[in-house]
Amino acid sequence: MTNSSSDSRALRKFLRHKPAVVASFIIAAYAVVAMLLLFTNMITMDDTLQRVGPETIPGFSSVQNPEKRLEDAEWLLDRIDTLAGREDPRAALDSFRDLGVRHVAEIPIEDLQQRVEEGWEIYDRLAEVEDLTAAVNGTLNSPDAPTGEVVLADLQQLELKLDELLAPMTAKEKSTRWFEMLFGTDRQGRSIFYRSVYSIRVAVLVGLITGLLSVTIGTIAGLLSGYFGGWVDNLITWLYSTFASIPNIVLLILLAFMFDGGHIDEPLNRWTGGLLKWLIGGRLDETLIPVYIAFTATFWIGPCRVIRGETLKIRELEYVQAATVMGFGRTRILLRHILPNVTYLMLINFSLLFIGAIKSEVILSFLGLGVKKGPSWGIMISQSKVEVINGFFWQIGTATVLMFFLVLAFNVLSDALQDVLDPKHV
Amino acid sequence: MSFVEVNNLVKHFPIRGGILNRVIAQVQAVSDVSLRIEKGETLGVIGESGCGKSTLGKTMIRLIEPTSGDVRFDGVEITGLSHAELMPIRQRMQFIFQDPYSSLNPRMTAQQMLAEVIRFHDVVPAKETDKYIEELLETVQLRKDSKNRYPHEFSGGQRQRLNIARALAVKPDFIIADEPVSALDVSVQAQILNLLMDLREKFGLTIMFISHDLKVVEHFCDRMVVMYLGTIVERLSCDDIYNQAQHPYTKALLKSNPINDPDDRETLYILEGEVPSPSNPPPGCPFVTRCDIAEERCKSERPPLVQLGDEHQIACWAVTHPANASTSSDAL
């Protein structure tokens, strides 16, 4: 149905719905990022696992306290000192950047050791101060304590010394560094920005695959059971009632154990004659397969019920009877006269299932049942349990905000779709 | 042999209930109906809601499978035919539905809808489809450029014209019109009836016209049958129904017609009582519960259709074998 007036009218109505248009742009942005993550190496799994900082570094422009700065400096100094003392210090130092930190300056080892020594001197001075924060604020009570200015100057000098130890950054490194540090790091020093953005990939994969599978299965089952009735209807109704009675999580645990250790990508690829490999290039996360199956097994029930009901209604309408009088076969009636009148339900159900799947995935990953490899918003939230107690909110914050915008946008969109596509709302 | 024959047609719908979902009763929608329709004639079927007139029409066209009895169309018995065998008959028999709002697929334009029918039955060569669609629209007095419009863009009357166009598209001989005007405004009703009359003449159609409106039937049809609770109680010619009608139910229908005079409201006759449930009809005459001339016999014995005049049959003990008359004739 190209260029049909009913569809163009629906489009006009949709465009008038401003929040829905904004929501579609947000969803499009997420989709673009997800595609880039799936098909290019914009951010790889290694990036999300690599250490970019000593440990928790604040994001969201929070100011570090002096203790934290000193700790970070100590970590760096200690690393370089240890490596410089090895038998082949140059090679050891080169391996330093594998930790995700910057290159060490290309200077003779003696000079390097000299600078490390100087660094330790300043460090020792600062380590003697009883309470650094209090000292900086000038609220330290003992009379012989250094003033705030002195402590601060020492700290800055120490950081400058560390900068001298490290090679100057190129422009590309600078921008990469900026992204890495945008939302800070977690307790293992991994970039929260990388981890949270990479999680979009998992979210969209789970949402898209379970959404599409569930709607397809649900539509076929609903159409058949609604149109043919009799034993087909009884069978499908029994089937979905049975599936609805199994708790999602129990099914998931079961499937997770079933697929544990087994390599699913391989046999699946062989079975489809290499189609899978060609389609996604082995990018289907095999650890996610239990998630897809468990979600689809329970999610198809929603669209199936709705479409069965609608089919039952449409089957008795006079235009279907008119088609029967014309002598049209059942397949033609089902595909040309009933299916087009339930497509709006498929769209609405898909948008509902998409967010449903993402939310469930986050919850399951939080419980340690969902994503097994790489980051996910659920895993990030789960990991930030300890951090939040200590006041480090940026990990849980970033994961939640990214998920919030995606879910909200889809909610707004599915609301608008119901308004626009449901003929009864016209 | 008549063009369309219906012999002893029965349709019972089972009512299921209980834990085991067993049949606990039967709705006797159509019980033992026989009809003859001659080629080119228009037969009116009249009766109140729920009397089984629509079920009769839908059973005749095999939308509903009959419980027993048979339907013959142009000499061919169609009740036992398979889907494929029925195909050529489908093209010759068409149905116009009552509700112009639910009888058109909301997702198909007029063009798509008509083209599907025409191509499916290969009514005209593929190249002439568009031309034929325009002709059809013209025939039912719709504008040619309305063919790309969706059903919701048409008014009720226009939708009913489109329904008629769809029925006509396959060039049928026989059309069953199931209350085609009852969902329309009175002014539009007249337009659609006039259109149907023109088309009847133009294409030589045989029509079975189902209605509850006596005036419409009187105006539109050659003969009529009156149905009550699944059976035919009277059949008569439409020429002079006011003088001819003898059955108390037909008379009640005639008397209940609204009168075009606000001062004369008092004389409006309203039939007392309720229609008995079709799942449990009275054993005798179905009308006995509301009849004001009912006799003892009417309660136990079902009256047969008796020939009264040339084109007049009636099923009523009180009219054909009145109790008083029979006793007097016995005395003689």
Image (tube, grey):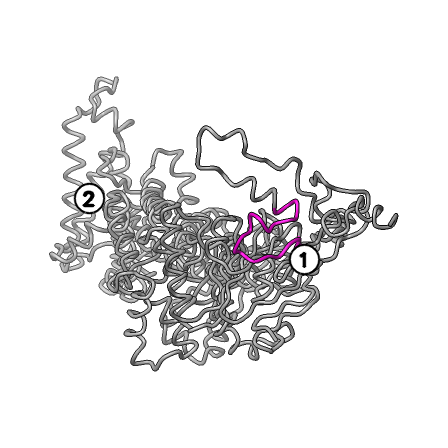
Label 2 element class? helix
Disc 2 residue crowd, few under 14, some 14–19, many 20+, Cα 10 Å:
many
Q: Is residue B241 magenta?
A: yes
Residue B263 in sight: yes
Which of the pair A275/B137 is nearer the observer? B137
Amino acid at circle 2:
Gly
Which of the pair A420/B11 is nearer the observer? B11
Residue in the image at 58% along x and 47% along y = B49
Report the disc number at residue A119.
2
> Alpha carbon of mark 2 to alpha carbon of mark 1: how far?
126 Å
Residue B54 coordinates in the image, percent (x, y): 57, 56
**Circle 1 marks a residue in which chain?**
B
Q: Are marks 2 and 1 in contact (CB under 8 Å)?
A: no
**Circle 2 marks a residue in which chain?**
A
Residue B147 coordinates in the image, percent (x, y): 29, 64
Position of residue B264 relative to residue B57, above or below, is above
Q: Is residue A34 magenta?
A: no
Q: Provide the residue span drawn in magenta.
A: B230-250
> Residue most toward the front?
B332
Residue in the image at 69% along x and 67% along y = B69
Report the disc number at residue B308.
1
Q: Quadrant location of residue A312?
A: bottom right
Residue A352 coordinates in the image, percent (x, y): 42, 49
Amino acid at circle 1:
Leu
Residue in the image at 50% along x and 70% along y = B93
Which of the pair B148/A246 is nearer the observer? B148
